[in-house]
Amino acid sequence: MRVENLAKIYILLHVRKFNKKSECLHCHESEKLIGVFYSKKKALDIIEFYKKLEGFKDYPNGFCLQEYLIDEIDDLKIDRLLENLKKGMYVG
């Protein structure tokens, strides 16, 4: 199967690093899974929406959009995704 025929999904995360102990006593960063999208444009629109919300507007550079090909194995990306899910990321 050729790569251009593979479907893509986009996983949108938001990562916030804490600089002060008072912000978060038990962690150094917060990762949130915003959603999984078939359309890159939809994911980018969601980023713009979230940038206006409390808890996100102060960290506009914390968004991370990862592209995955359906039915293709990328061990590095899968390992990172599983690691993040084990950390108990918020699903919204």
Image: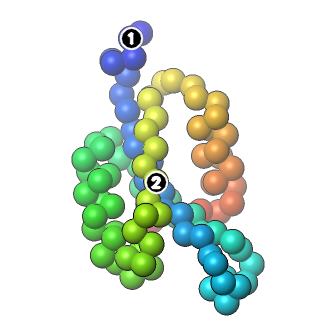
Label 2: element kind: strand
Which residue is at the front of the view, 37 or 61? 61
Q: Earlier in the sequence, mark 2 or mark 1?
A: 1
Q: Is residue 44 left or right of residue 86?
A: left
Q: In the rendering, which numbered label is found on residue 53?
A: none
- Check if mark 2's residue and mark 1's residue have beta carbons within 8 Å: no
Q: Nearer the viewer, residue 65 or 9?
A: 65
Task: Check disc 2 and report the residue beneath it.
Answer: 64
Q: Quadrant of the N terminus?
A: top left
Q: For residue 2, which numbered disc appears in the image?
A: 1
Q: Position of residue 13 (x, y in %)?
A: 48, 57
Cα distance between the residues tagged 2 and 1: 27 Å
Quarter of the image where one finds residue 16: bottom right
- Going 33% across and 61% down the picture, which residue do you hit? 47
- Crowding at label 2, few (<14), some or many (≥20) Cα neighbours within 10 Å? some
- Quarter of the image holding residue 30? bottom right
Q: Is residue 91 visible?
A: no
Few, some or many residues within 10 Å of mark 1 (<14, 14–19, 20+): few
Q: Is residue 78 left or right of residue 72?
A: right
**Residue type at the position of mark 1:** Arg
